[in-house]
């Protein structure tokens, strides 16, 4: 293979990689130079396959590599690129927005909260605010507070913003392993229709939602099993005739910016393991059946004959899985007491009632809350940052931290920090927090 075709090649050799890098493997596998094919073996933990040693082409060497193009990853990639760092974004599916778009989870929650003067105010600005503003200007979002967006418009807007920022986008590409040198991440392996390749980067940002990268890198984390759902949309909801004989009210979900199209949330089964592919597959099929049958019932209900199932989400509704054990664990107490941090990277809001000190605090009374940079920093792995629903927080705060607004804010913070670290050739933990805050403000973030 010539360099212009792709560059260089990385030789994997039993946990050690050429170019002085080392490779961590998740599945026990001892490469044997003599073996040209994979060999299945049995051991105490079940069958394993021995993967033969092979050369892996290097697809790119870049400053910043963001893995996962959900709300967090899209914001992170745009932010990193805006600092002037060369930035790649890797996404396994064919669109940006993650659960926001592909999961049909359409309300961008936590845009507002109460300030120190007890007034409700907007708190999500910066890149998340820009996305929201663009969708509003297109007539593709409804409601000023916690706007509900159209998913196709959001995919389009996010693509446009990625292009304008000069991010190098790789769709249809799955991050499958990490390339390590000691405790520093040096890049990742990806799988796609082009085969297995390596991408080398000065800084990697894990925005996979499930913390795939910090897991592979060997960092510490908690795993939270939670309810998994599947969202769907209904069409022709504006044709329902309440005057029809035998009419009964059915759950048709909530309006979207497209007249006659509603989105229907599903809480789903509790305590689900989002890291077990067999479980995910079963849930996917069970939920599709449940939704299909329910829509048939709706259509058979007088007055609802024209309602139809427009689509089920292309991404299963995984709420939680891995949560990073990072440098600082953000707490409910922090979020309820206007706790301020000298390394603040952004502020998020409230959208639901929380129990605090034995009392129910409704969202309209809840304060805005700061997010410190240290909550995006893994304890062990260097050159890695984490944003989105798997950054470091206490489980008590999960309802606010997993929400799209918060993911956009943590993504903006992590991407900006990654860009600065790459350009200054520093470890992310060593960058100057004032430089970071200055750059975030320049990029329109609100830090309180
Ligand atoms: C049913 C449901 C309802 C919800 N309702 C709301 C709501 O109304 N409002 C709200 O604000 N929030 C809601 N949420 C929460 C919110 O949608 C998510 O928590 C948020 O989208 C998380 O953003 P993220 O960027 O961290 O991760 P995700 O949105 O999960 O994005 C992660 C991205 O990374 C990609 N990826 C993952 N692994 C890899 C890999 N190995 N290689 C390459 N790409 C990878 C994925 O394809 C995905 O695009 C809901 C969630 C669910 C499940």
Image (cartoon, grey):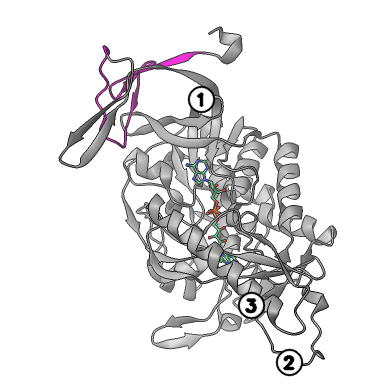
Callout in the foreground (1, 3):
3
Callout in the foreground (2, 1):
2
Q: Are marks 2 and 3 in contact (CB under 8 Å)?
A: no
Q: Secondary structure at mark 3?
A: helix
To which residue does mark 3 refer? Answer: 297
At a point 66% along the width and 35% down the height, the residue shown is 167
Check the image and name the residue furthest to the right.
Answer: 138
Magenta stretch, main secondary structure, is: loop
* Residue 280 or residue 267, whichever sits in front: 280
Lower sequence index among marks 2 and 1 = 1
At a point 60% along the width and 74% down the height, the residue shown is 294
176 lies above or below 111: above
To which residue does mark 1 refer? Answer: 195
Rendered location of residue 178, percent (x, y): 40, 33
Q: Are marks 1 and 3 in contact (CB under 8 Å)?
A: no
315 lies above or below 228: above
In whole angstroms, how far apart are the C-alphas of marks 1 and 3?
A: 45 Å
Residue 351 circle label: none
In whole angstroms, how far apart are the C-alphas of marks 2 and 1?
A: 58 Å
Specify the segment rendered in magenta: 8-34
Rendered location of residue 424, percent (x, y): 53, 31
To which residue does mark 2 refer? Answer: 246
Lower sequence index among marks 1 and 3 = 1
Q: Quadrant of residue 238?
A: bottom right
Q: Quadrant of residue 395?
A: bottom left
**In the shown orientation, is residue 429 left or right of residue 406?**
left
CA neighbours of label 2 inside 10 A, class few (<14), some (14 to 19), many (20+): few
In whole angstroms, how far apart are the C-alphas of marks 2 and 3?
A: 14 Å
């Amino acid at each position: 293979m010539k360099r212009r075709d792709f560059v260089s090649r990385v030789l994997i050799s039993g946990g050690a990689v050429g170019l002085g890098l080392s490779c961590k493997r998740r599945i026990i596998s001892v490469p044997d130079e003599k073996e040209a094919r994979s060999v299945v073996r049995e051991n105490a933990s079940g069958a394993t396959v021995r993967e033969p040693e092979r050369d892996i082409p290097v697809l790119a060497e870049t400053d910043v590599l963001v893995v996962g193009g959900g709300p967090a990853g899209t914001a992170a990639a745009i932010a990193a690129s805006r600092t002037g760092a060369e930035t790649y974004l890797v996404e396994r599916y064919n669109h940006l927005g993650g659960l926001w778009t592909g999961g049909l989870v359409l309300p961008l929650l936590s845009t507002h909260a109460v300030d120190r003067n007890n007034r409700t105010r907007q708190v999500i600005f910066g890149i998340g605010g820009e996305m929201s503003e663009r969708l509003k200007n297109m007539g593709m979002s409804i409601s000023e507070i916690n706007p509900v967006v159209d998913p196709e418009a959001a995919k389009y807007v996010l693509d446009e913003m990625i292009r304008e920022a000069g991010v190098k986008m790789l769709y249809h590409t799955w991050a499958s392993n990490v390339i390590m040198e000691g405790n520093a991440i040096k890049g990742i392996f990806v799988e796609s229709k082009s085969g297995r390749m390596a991408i080398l980067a000065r800084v990697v940002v894990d925005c996979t939602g499930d913390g795939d990268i910090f897991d592979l890198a060997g960092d510490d984390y908690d795993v939270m099993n939670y309810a998994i759902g599947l969202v769907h949309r209904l069409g022709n909801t504006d044709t329902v005739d309440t005057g029809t004989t035998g009419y009964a009210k059915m759950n048709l979900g909530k309006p979207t910016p497209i007249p006659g199209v509603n989105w229907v949330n599903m809480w789903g089964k509790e305590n689900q393991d989002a890291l077990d592919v067999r479980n995910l597959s079963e849930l996917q099929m069970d939920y599709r059946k449940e939704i299909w049958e329910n829509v048939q019932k709706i259509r058979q209900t007088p007055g609802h004959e024209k309602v139809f199932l427009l689509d089920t989400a292309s991404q299963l509704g995984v709420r939680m899985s891995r949560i990073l054990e990072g440098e600082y664990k953000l707490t409910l107490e922090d979020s309820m007491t206007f706790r301020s941090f000298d390394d603040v990277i952004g502020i998020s809001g409230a959208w639901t009632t929380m129990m605090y000190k034995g009392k129910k605090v409704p969202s309209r009374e809840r304060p805005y809350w700061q997010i410190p940079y240290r909550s995006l920093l893994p304890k062990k792995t260097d050159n890695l940052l984490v944003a989105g629903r798997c950054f470091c927080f206490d489980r008590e705060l999960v309802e606010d931290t997993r929400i799209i607004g918060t993911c956009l804010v943590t993504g903006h913070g992590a991407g900006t920090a990654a860009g600065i670290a790459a350009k200054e050739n520093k470890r992310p933990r060593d960058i100057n927090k004032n430089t970071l805050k200055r750059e975030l403000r320049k990029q329109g973030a609100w830090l309180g």
